[in-house]
Amino acid sequence: MTTRIAVLLVLVLVFLPGCALLEAPTPAPQTGPFPYHSLAEAPAPLRRVVMLPLDAESCPAPHRLLVERSLQRAIAARNLFEILPVDERDVADTHIVSTRSTGTYHTDDLILLSRRFGAEGVLHGVITQFQAYPQVVIGLRLTLLDCRNGRVPWATDILLDASNRVIEQDVHNYYDTRLRDQGSLMDYEQVLISPRYFADYGADRVSGTLAKALLPRNEIEASNTRR
């Protein structure tokens, strides 16, 4: 009996580590949390787009910058257009300053701003909600104005809550398909608890909807592959 128990213990010690290495399958990506507006047909390509500083209803300045930079990197990685971030000093002498506090903009002001920087479009938005802990929460409302014709080829209004089960599954997919091949040592749960990594996740998904709105269907996959 003692020998049999010893053999069983050895088998447990041998096979248990292998069982622990078994990983859950990659969930399918979730599109539900990322609604967006787009035109019926993809617009003519934009060469350069000015990105205004994000307004923030309830977000400390360091976290506002964190979200801004995540968006800038993710959009630039899509190779949709040249993105030109501007800061407060660049718009200090424009009428746009008087309306930014409410998150509203006059189309004519944005068109004048785009001409100053030789751009065809302006991207602006508001961080509608931000929470760093106990669960990361990021709310974003973004609009892209095509200053050649005054139309809006893309806009989105999202709320990402790391405690939401659907978001958790999508973060798992993001980690497995975007970060694992880059040699990342963290697991997807760390994305859920880190404001920085969660902002990168949200920016990746948001930029994906931007690509869908701006690119013809046969070019969307190519945009994803280049990243």
Image (cartoon, helix red, strand yellow):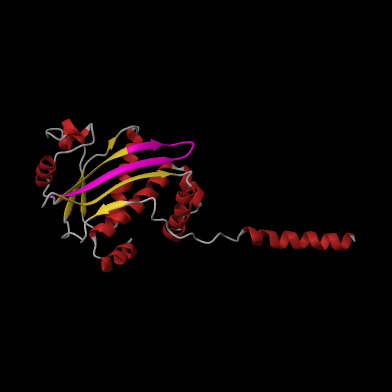
Whether residue 186 appears in this view of the structure is no
Q: Is residue 21 above or below residue 110?
A: below
Residue 88 seen in the current view: yes
Q: Position of residue 33 (x, y in %)?
A: 39, 50
Percent x, y of residue 73: 30, 50
Q: Which image quadrant is residue 215 in?
A: bottom left
Q: Where residue 180 sits: x, y (%)?
A: 46, 58
Residue 204 spot, x, y in % from top left: 35, 53
Quadrant of the drawing holding the N terminus: bottom right
The residue that appears at 44% across and 61% down in the rendered structure is 181
Residue placed furthest toward the right: 1
Residue 145 lies in the magenta-colored region: yes
Give yes or no for residue 141 being in the magenta stretch.
yes
Please give the name of the residue rendered at 26% of the width and 39% of the height, measured from the top-left corner. Answer: 54
Between residue 1 and residue 128, name the one nearer to us.
Answer: 128
In which image quadrant can residue 179 be found?
bottom left
> Is residue 209 shown left or right of residue 109?
right
Magenta stretch, overall SS = strand
Residue most toward the bottom? 218
Q: Which residues are magenta?
A: 128-147
Q: Quadrant of the C terminus?
A: bottom left
